[in-house]
Structure formats: structure tokens, C-alpha cells
Amino acid sequence: MARTWTAEQREAQRQRCLETKPWTRSTGPTSEEGKLISSMNNLRHGLYCKRNKIVRLLATWLLQAQQLEECKAELATWLPQALALRRENPALFDALIFQIQSENKQETGNPE
């Protein structure tokens, strides 16, 4: 349970901190070896540790798999109609495909 401070207690603690200046007596590493070891803490415990990299990678894969399934479901709804149009009117189908490709080039800025 967190301590609750009265206004007087908080002010008294603030004054003690200003008098003693605990930040001037840092207990961090002083040797080069200690500093090197300390600098690696983020790789072991922080956002870039191997465990967290694996979790982020799995989350990315799951999201991509979900997006792929959504794409497949959308494709399944309109693909039969597109194939029927291709059989019945190939010229119109080709014109629509060309128009879609042109729009995609403009959106992505890809000239190909």
C-alpha cells in the first residue's frame, strides 16, 4: 500500500532533500567495466530484450495473418463475380483491371 503524505510531511521531506542533496552521491557504476555492464541492462530487461523482440514479432505475425484472412474473405465475396464478368465480357474486364492498376500506381507513386 502506498504511503499517504500530509502537506507538512511532504514539505519537510522536500527541505531535507534540498539540504542533503542525495543526487550528488549517485551509486551508479564508476568503473568502465561496470558502466559497460550497466549499459547492457536494456538489452536484458528493457524493450529490446530477446523475449520482448519475440513477443513483438509474434504480434506482428498474428496481425498479418488476421489481415490475410480478412483479405481472403473479401476476395471470396467478389472473385466469383469478377470471373463471371471476365467470361461474359473480356474487354470490359480488361478495362476495369487497367483502371484499378492505374489508380494503384497513383496512390503508391509506383510508376510500374
Image: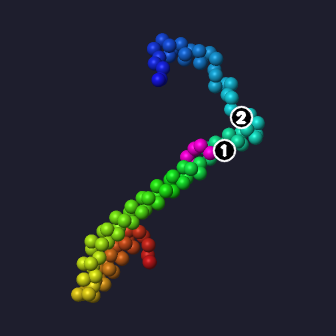
**Amino acid bearing label 2:** Pro
Which secondary structure dominates the residues rendered in magenta?
loop
Q: Is residue 47 magenta?
A: yes
The residue under label 2 is 29
Which residue is rendered at x = 47% and y = 57% of the image? 60
* Depicted 72 relative to depicted 37: above or below: below
**Mark 1 sits on what residue?**
40
Is 5 in front, or is 1? 1
Mark 2 residue element: loop
> Mark 1 packing: few (<14 Cα in 10 Å), some, or many (20+)?
few
Q: Quadrant of residue 100?
A: bottom left
Place of residue 28 in the rendered image (x, y in percent of width and height, measured from the top left): 68, 32
**Would you identify the image quadrant in which residue 103 lies?**
bottom left
Pointer 2 local density, CA inside 10 Å: few below 14, some 14–19, many at least 20: few
What label does residue 24 carry, if any?
A: none
- Give coordinates of residue 39: x percent, y percent: 67, 42
Which portion, as a residue range, is magenta?
A: 44-48
Residue nearer the viewer, 43 or 20:
43
User: How far apart are the alpha carbons under marks 2 and 1?
Assistant: 12 Å
Give the secondary structure at mark 1: loop
- Residue at 44% across / 72% down in the picture? 110
Residue 72 relative to residue 9: left or right: left
The vertical placement of 28 against 5, above or below, is below
Q: Residue at x 74, y 34 (%)?
A: 30
* Residue 90, horizontal then vertical, whole percent: 27, 87
Comes first in the chain, label 2 or label 1: 2
Depicted 49 relative to depicted 93: above or below: above
**In this picture, residue 100 sits left or right of residue 30:** left
In the rendered image, residue 57 lying in the magenta stretch gets the answer no
Which amino acid, by three-letter code, is at mark 1? Met
